[in-house]
Image (spheres, coloured by chain):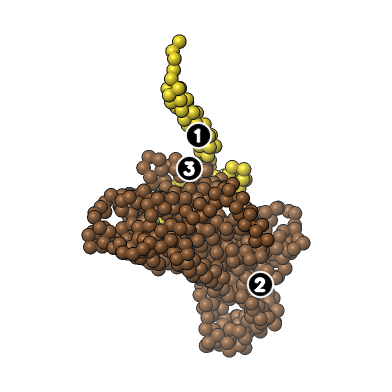
Amino acid sequence: MNRLVRGMLAWLEDRTGYRGLRRHLLDEPLPPGTGWWFTLGSVLLFGLGVQVVTGIALALFYAPTPDHAWDSVRYISSGVRGGAFVRGLHHWGASVVVVAAVVHMIRVVFFGSYRKPRELNWIVGLMLLLVILAFGLTGYLLPWDQRAYWATVVTINIARLSPGVGEAMATLMRGGADIGALTLTRWYAAHVLVLPPALALLTIVHLYLMRRHGISGPVRPRLGASRPFFPYQAARDLTMAAAVGVLLAVLAWKGAPALEPPADPTSSDYVPRPEWYFLGLFQLLKYFPGRWEIVGALIVPGVVGLWLFLLPWIDRGRTREWRGRRVVLSLFTAGLAAVVALTILGASDKPASQSSTWTIREQGGAVLALSSDRCVSCHGPDKVASAIEPGRIGKSANWLAAHVEDPEVIAPGIREAPKTNDTENKSMVAALAKLRTGPPPALDAGLRRVYTVLAQHCLECHKIDGTGGTDGPDLTHAGEKLDAGTIELRIIDPKQVKADAEMPSFRDKLSLEDIRAVAGWLAGRK
Amino acid sequence: MVVRSEESRRSALSKLVSAGLGLITAGLAGLVGLVAAPKASATTRRWRAAASIFDLPPKDPFTAVLADKHADGWYETRKEQVVFIDREGDGYRAMSATCAHLGCRVRWESSRQQFLCPCHGGVYDREGRVVSGPPPRGLERVAVRVNPQTSDIEVEL
């Protein structure tokens, strides 16, 4: 048996010469003192490998069209075995790759590894960083959710600022006059067909040049014998990759990436924020008003980029020690500190957005929309229209408002619209907007009844917990002054309690049980 | 007859092969470029009803969403555009809701009586002039007229 295997390997060696290649790849002599700092490139390579494998898995399910992209990503997260985990790995893997690339770059700068004769490899490395960022940018358009859409609007408008060629570049990126189906296919093609070969080619060149000139080694060369890459440095690489792999798995397991509501060009309640590694650039844009915007959008990043590309020629000297390179290292550190500071500022600058708690109106409206005879008379598993599913409502807010107000605008005359009043319409519209984010909180039967009545009738004029109208008194603390009996009487016949009351009687509109339930609940609000 | 040496024949052929490879590469690149370059799209503006004069709220500008059939490559969709309609003197004004900075959707903040952009903090006053933040110019004005027959406010988009 053993002889058979040996024979086959000998045959393979004769036909391919694989042993020479293996020796060449693994037995690279490393200078003494090559330690943990030199594992960062391998960590990056590991991260890129994870992205390739998980990316292929995601591509089996993803559909790059405006009417299917969002649904297919939702399906990956909820319907594919292990899909949420794989998507989590790909999502967090992108961050790991960016961090690993930047830390690797910091190591190279502080070790002066870009010095002659390694200038060209430094440039190839910077090009790899740009390709990685391009992956990030094209990747997060693909889910076609709100963040995807608006981040792309901003990106393309930044490209438009480029003097002379801006408009042409923007059109090329959009694939047409507007962001839409043609933009999505274009960015998808870039993400899965154009960038991967570019990444592979640059990585091969990067590794080839690394081998051609050898590892730069510690800043101050040490005496001693060189040791082969395998297994000494390979063991360190593997340890680091395993540690990062565990971290990545925990992130993917614990923090599934969010899928925001589907892209909606008309929504006004969405606060767009880019992925964290673009937050610094995003924050920079705020500091350059008016015609200076091109400074923040293109000139500052451009100058920083050019400085980095020219670094091997700016920083020339005899030694790689820090003492002789104070100016360059201070500038680089200051730049890093600025990027970190801008990122933190960008992350902490959160304008007020929609809260994630459900108001009474939204909860009552959700009961009306999901389980009363209004919407479900047409929307359901075997009805004329598909069921209303929390978390996957794709229509825009304005469309929903128009449809709730007049269901027949969609298909006039083919079915009878349910009778509703204005107050409950408003509540259902509010609920539908909230239902985009997921299902409403569970309510017991008593609260269901109370919230439904409030959403149908009371909130038109009264405010409770900050939502509702202002024509009548605020009822947030109604129980402080009134007991249940008095409130009940006021609902049944307001004029009997107060002769000049403007509130109409609800005797004919509500059942006695409803009135009792609401009065009892209000009396409990102290 | 000119006798050519093997050397010069080889160098001539080398140049020919290089030129041939270059031509093939350029041809393929040109073809991809031709396909990838987007078609120029004709922008057609027309008058469209945005709101009824009775729709305008007493205190705030009206936010109108105009939807139109829109061919996006192979994909038929509805293109939705947002305009703000407001009273101005005896007539009306209409403004695009697209921020002049980087194209986010601005919204009317009734309590501050200003338009706010959620992206980079641009602020406009009720007439669409820049109050603060990065926008280089005010909100774009849209041509507006009233149709006397229907009492509709129409905008040219």
Instruction: Name the residue rendered at 56%, 82% in the picture.
Output: A498
Q: Can residue A434 be seen in this view?
A: yes
> Which one is closest to the eye, mark 3 or mark 2?
3
- Looking at the image, which is closer to me, A262 or A503? A262
Q: What residue type is labelled 3?
A: Thr
Label 1 is found on which chain of the structure? B
Q: Can residue A343 be seen in this view?
A: no
* Separation of residues labelled 3 and 2 (CA atoms): 46 Å
Residue A470 percent coordinates (x, y): 51, 72
Instruction: Name the residue rendered at 60%, 52% in the picture.
Output: A10
Image colour for chain B is yellow
Going by the image, does A402 lie left or right of B36?
A: right
Q: Residue A367 carries which label?
A: 2
Q: How crowded is mark 3: few (under 14 residues within 10 Å), some or many (20 or more)?
A: many
Q: Which amino acid does label 2 sit on?
A: Val
Are labels 1 and 3 assigned to the same chain? no
* Separation of residues labelled 1 and 3 (CA atoms): 25 Å
> Which one is closest to the eye, mark 1 or mark 2?
1
Q: Which mark is residue A171?
A: 3
Quadrant in the picture for residue A216:
bottom left
- Residue positioned most to the top: B1
Residue A148 percent coordinates (x, y): 52, 56
> Which one is closest to the eye, mark 1 or mark 3?
1
Image colour for chain A is brown
For the residues labelled 1 and 3, say whether their Cβ atoms are less than 8 Å apart: no
The residue that label 1 is drawn on is B25
Label 2 is found on which chain of the structure? A
Instruction: Name the residue rendered at 49%, 55% in the picture.
Output: A23
